[in-house]
C-alpha cells in the first residue's frame, strides 16, 4: 500500500488532515485517518523518521496563521496534537524543515513575510526566533499589490533557502546557519528576478543543484535558471509555456516536481486548463522537452505527487473535491489515468510517506 498525508481547506470541524492509502493491486483508495479540529491545514509535512507531522493553519485576520505539531503513533494509527506556534503573519501557505530538523520555516502569503520556528526535542514548537518581511510589489495591481511569499525550498547543499515571492517577481535567497541565533541571512546574490508579471510560486532543483525549475503561476510557465555556485551567479536560460500561445482561458500554474531519478519534470496548471504537463529533462543541459499533456481528472489541480517507487502519480483537484491515480511509466515518464478516485473536500497538498 502507498500512503500519503493530505492537506486540505476546511469548512467544518470534522474536515482536516487525512492519511490516505492507495492499493495498486486493486486500484482503490482508503481513508486511513482523519484529524479534524484544525482550520485550513493546506500544507503538511513529516520529519524523516515519520513520527512527527507539521501543518499550517492558513488563516488571516488579527489572530494570524500558525504551525501545528502532531505526534504520529503509526502502530495505533493515531495523530495527537502537541502544540502550535504563530507564523507571525497571515495566510501561511508553505512550510519546510531544515536538514537538521531543528527548525521549521513558514511562509505567509497574505502578509508577505516568513518565520523561523525552533523544534524542541519532544517535537513541540517554540516561539519564532526570526521573522523576515519582504517589500516591493509587481505590475499586476490585483495579484501583486504587495509581497506574497509562496514557497521556501532548501538548496540540495542544505546551506541556502530559496523563497519565491509571487507579489514581487523575485526569488529571495538566504544563507542558513543553524548555529546562529537568527539562522537566516541574505545570500550572495540576495535574490534573482523573473519576468514582470510572472508570479513565481514553487521551485525545484536538479540533483546537482545547478539548475532551478520555477513555476511562473500567473503566466503558466516553467522557467529554467542556471545556478553557478562557484561564481554565485543565476542566469535565466529558457521559459516553457504550459498553454498554447492562442489560449484565451484563465491561467494558474501550481505545482512542479521532478521524478526521483531526475529524468522527468511534471507541472500542474489550473485555471481553465486543468492539466498536468510532462517534460523530459536533458541530462547534459537540463533543458526541457514537452512529451505529454493530460487532464488532471478534475478541476483545479493545485497539487500532485509521485509515489516513492515512481510507479504512480496522484493528482488532487481542489474545486472538484477529488483525487485520481495515474499509472506512471518510469522509463518514459508518461502517465495514464486509472479508474479509481476518492472524494475529499478541497485537497490541496500531498506529502508522500516513504
Image: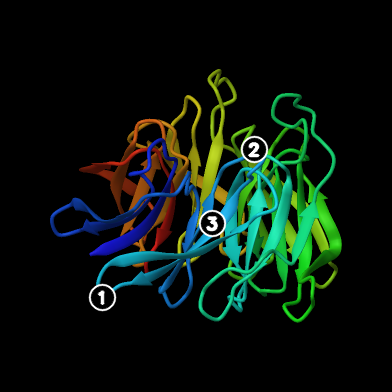
Q: Is residue 332 visible?
A: no
Secondary structure, mark 1, is loop
35 or 166: nearer the viewer: 35
Looking at the image, which residue is at 64% across and 32% down?
Answer: 219
- Please state if 243 lies on the left or on the right of 330 as rendered: right
Q: Name the residue beneath numbered marker 1.
A: 75
Looking at the image, which residue is at 35% across and 61% down?
Answer: 307
Above/below status of 63 relative to 19: above
Secondary structure, mark 3, is strand
Asked if disc 2 and disc 1 are in contact, CB closer than 8 Å, the reply is no
Looking at the image, which residue is at 79% across and 56% down?
Answer: 132
Q: Earlier in the sequence, mark 2 or mark 1?
A: 2
Q: Earlier in the sequence, mark 3 or mark 1?
A: 1
2 or 107: nearer the viewer: 107
Secondary structure, mark 2, is loop
Residue 203: where, in percent of width, then height? Answer: 62, 53
Q: Can residue 249 be seen in this view?
A: yes
Q: Distance between the residues labelled 3 and 1?
A: 40 Å
Q: How far apart are marks 3 and 2 (CA)?
A: 43 Å
Q: Name the residue beneath numbered marker 2.
A: 61
Residue 102: where, in percent of width, then height? Answer: 62, 76
Asked if disc 3 and disc 1 are in contact, CB closer than 8 Å, the reply is no
- Determine which of the numbered discs, if any, sits on residue 146 in the image: none
Asked if disc 3 and disc 2 are in contact, CB closer than 8 Å, the reply is no
Residue 247: where, in percent of width, then height? Answer: 55, 21
239 or 253: nearer the viewer: 253
The image quadrant where one finds the N terminus is: bottom left
Q: Which of marks 3 and 2 is nearer the N terminus?
A: 2
- Numbered label tally: 3
Residue 316 in which image quadrant:
top left
Q: Name the residue beneath numbered marker 3.
A: 281
Above/below status of 179 relative to 33: below
Amino acid at each position: 500500500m502507498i500512503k500519503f498525508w493530505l492537506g486540505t481547506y476546511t469548512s467544518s470541524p470534522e474536515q482536516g488532515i487525512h492519511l490516505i492509502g492507495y492499493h495498486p493491486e486493486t486500484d482503490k483508495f482508503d481513508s486511513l485517518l482523519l484529524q479534524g479540529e484544525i482550520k485550513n491545514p493546506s500544507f503538511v509535512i513529516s520529519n524523516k523518521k515519520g513520527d512527527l507531522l507539521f501543518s499550517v493553519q492558513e488563516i488571516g485576520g488579527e489572530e494570524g496563521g500558525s504551525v501545528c505539531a502532531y505526534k504520529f503513533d503509526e502502530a495505533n494509527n493515531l495523530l495527537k496534537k502537541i502544540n502550535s506556534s504563530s507564523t507571525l503573519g497571515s495566510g501561511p501557505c508553505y512550510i519546510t524543515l531544515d536538514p537538521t530538523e531543528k527548525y521549521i520555516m513558514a511562509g505567509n502569503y497574505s502578509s508577505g513575510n516568513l518565520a523561523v520556528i525552533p523544534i524542541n526535542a519532544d517535537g513541540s514548537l517554540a516561539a519564532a526566533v526570526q521573522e523576515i518581511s519582504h517589500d516591493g510589489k509587481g505590475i499586476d495591481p490585483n495579484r501583486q499589490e504587495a509581497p506574497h511569499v509562496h514557497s521556501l525550498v532548501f538548496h540540495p547543499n542544505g546551506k541556502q533557502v530559496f523563497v519565491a515571492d509571487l507579489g514581487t517577481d523575485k526569488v529571495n535567497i538566504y544563507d542558513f546557519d543553524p548555529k546562529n541565533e537568527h539562522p537566516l541571512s541574505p545570500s550572495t546574490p540576495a535574490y534573482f528576478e523573473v519576468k514582470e508579471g510572472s508570479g513565481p510560486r514553487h521551485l525545484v532543483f536538479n540533483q546537482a543543484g545547478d539548475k532551478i525549475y520555477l513555476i511562473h503561476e500567473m503566466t503558466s510557465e516553467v522557467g529554467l535558471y542556471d545556478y553557478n555556485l562557484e561564481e554565485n551567479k543565476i542566469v535565466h536560460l529558457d521559459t516553457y509555456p504550459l498553454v498554447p500561445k492562442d489560449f484565451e482561458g484563465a491561467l494558474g500554474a501550481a505545482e512542479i516536481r521532478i521524478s526521483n531519478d531526475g529524468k522527468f519534470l511534471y507541472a500542474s496548471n489550473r485555471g481553465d486548463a486543468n492539466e498536468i504537463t510532462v517534460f523530459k529533462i536533458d541530462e547534459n543541459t537540463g533543458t526541457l522537452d514537452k512529451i505529454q499533456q493530460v487532464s488532471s481528472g478534475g478541476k483545479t489541480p493545485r497539487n500532485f505527487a509521485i509515489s516513492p517507487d515512481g510507479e504512480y502519480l496522484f493528482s488532487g483537484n481542489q474545486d472538484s473535491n477529488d483525487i485520481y491515480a495515474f499509472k506512471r511509466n518510469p522509463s518514459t515518464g508518461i502517465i495514464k489515468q486509472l479508474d479509481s478516485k476518492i472524494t475529499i473536500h478541497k485537497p490541496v497538498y500531498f506529502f508522500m510517506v516513504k
